[in-house]
Image: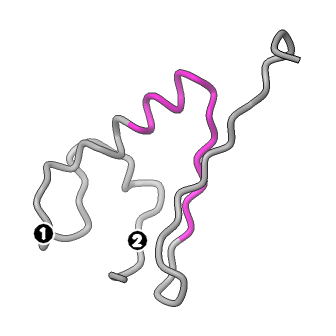
Amino acid sequence: MGQPIEDRKGIFGKYVRENSVVGGHGLGLSIVKEIAKSYDIDIELTSSIEDGTRFSYSFKCHAGDI
Protein backbone atom coordinates (compact mmCIF):
# COMPACT_ATOMS: atom_id res chain seq x y z
CA MET A 1 0.00 0.00 0.00
CA GLY A 2 1.11 3.52 -0.72
CA GLN A 3 0.26 6.89 0.69
CA PRO A 4 -3.41 7.86 0.79
CA ILE A 5 -4.67 10.24 -1.87
CA GLU A 6 -4.70 13.73 -0.39
CA ASP A 7 -6.70 15.69 -3.01
CA ARG A 8 -9.66 13.39 -3.64
CA LYS A 9 -11.45 15.78 -6.03
CA GLY A 10 -8.38 17.19 -7.75
CA ILE A 11 -6.96 13.75 -8.56
CA PHE A 12 -9.50 13.47 -11.39
CA GLY A 13 -8.08 16.52 -13.20
CA LYS A 14 -5.97 16.30 -16.34
CA TYR A 15 -2.21 15.95 -15.80
CA VAL A 16 -2.63 15.59 -12.03
CA ARG A 17 -0.26 13.25 -10.20
CA GLU A 18 0.26 13.11 -6.46
CA ASN A 19 3.80 11.79 -6.76
CA SER A 20 6.46 11.21 -9.37
CA VAL A 21 7.52 7.73 -8.22
CA VAL A 22 5.39 5.87 -10.78
CA GLY A 23 5.35 6.79 -14.47
CA GLY A 24 2.37 8.15 -16.34
CA HIS A 25 0.99 11.45 -17.51
CA GLY A 26 -1.93 11.95 -15.12
CA LEU A 27 -4.64 11.37 -17.70
CA GLY A 28 -6.20 8.04 -16.66
CA LEU A 29 -8.53 9.23 -13.90
CA SER A 30 -9.53 12.23 -15.98
CA ILE A 31 -10.68 9.86 -18.73
CA VAL A 32 -12.53 7.69 -16.19
CA LYS A 33 -14.28 10.80 -14.83
CA GLU A 34 -15.45 11.88 -18.30
CA ILE A 35 -16.78 8.40 -19.15
CA ALA A 36 -18.58 8.19 -15.80
CA LYS A 37 -20.11 11.63 -16.37
CA SER A 38 -21.32 10.60 -19.84
CA TYR A 39 -23.09 7.52 -18.49
CA ASP A 40 -24.35 9.06 -15.22
CA ILE A 41 -22.09 6.86 -13.07
CA ASP A 42 -21.22 8.05 -9.57
CA ILE A 43 -17.63 7.60 -8.38
CA GLU A 44 -16.78 7.40 -4.70
CA LEU A 45 -13.15 7.51 -3.59
CA THR A 46 -11.96 6.46 -0.16
CA SER A 47 -8.32 6.49 0.78
CA SER A 48 -6.54 5.93 4.08
CA ILE A 49 -3.19 4.58 5.17
CA GLU A 50 -4.92 1.75 7.08
CA ASP A 51 -7.31 0.56 4.34
CA GLY A 52 -5.60 1.70 1.13
CA THR A 53 -7.42 3.38 -1.74
CA ARG A 54 -10.77 2.25 -3.13
CA PHE A 55 -12.78 3.52 -6.08
CA SER A 56 -16.48 2.54 -6.02
CA TYR A 57 -18.79 3.04 -8.99
CA SER A 58 -22.59 3.27 -8.76
CA PHE A 59 -24.51 2.62 -11.95
CA LYS A 60 -28.02 4.04 -12.13
CA CYS A 61 -30.71 1.69 -13.35
CA HIS A 62 -32.65 2.83 -16.41
CA ALA A 63 -36.43 2.61 -16.06
CA GLY A 64 -36.72 1.00 -19.51
CA ASP A 65 -34.39 -1.84 -18.49
CA ILE A 66 -36.71 -3.12 -15.73
* Amino acid beneath label 2: Ile
Which of the 4 image quadrants contains residue 31?
top left
Q: Residues within 10 Å of mark 2 (few under 14, many from 20)?
A: some
Distance of label 1 from label 2 (alpha carbons): 13 Å
Residue stretch rendered in magenta on the structure:
32-46
Which residue is outermost to the front?
66
Q: Nearer the viewer, residue 42 or 15?
A: 42
**Up-down relation of residue 40 to residue 45 (above or below):** above
- Is residue 36 highlighted in magenta? yes
- Is residue 6 highlighted in magenta? no
Residue of label 2: 5
Which residue is outermost to the bottom?
50
**Up-down relation of residue 9 to residue 13 (above or below):** below
**Disc 1, SS:** loop
Q: Earlier in the sequence, mark 1 or mark 2?
A: 2
Q: Residue at x 14, y 48 (%)?
A: 25
Q: Nearer the viewer, residue 64 or 26?
A: 64
Left or right of residue 64, residue 4 in this image: left
Q: Residue at x 33, y 81 (%)?
A: 2
**Percent x, y for residue 41?**
62, 34
Q: Residue at x 51, y 73 (%)?
A: 47
Left or right of residue 43, residue 18 in this image: left
Q: Residue at x 63, y 41 (%)?
A: 42
Q: Quadrant of the C terminus?
A: top right
**Disc 2, SS:** loop
**Percent x, y for residue 49?**
46, 87
Do callouts 1 and 2 mark residues in contact (Cβ within 8 Å)? no
* Amino acid beneath label 1: Ser
Residue of label 1: 20
**Percent x, y for residue 30?**
34, 40
**Percent x, y for residue 57?**
61, 46
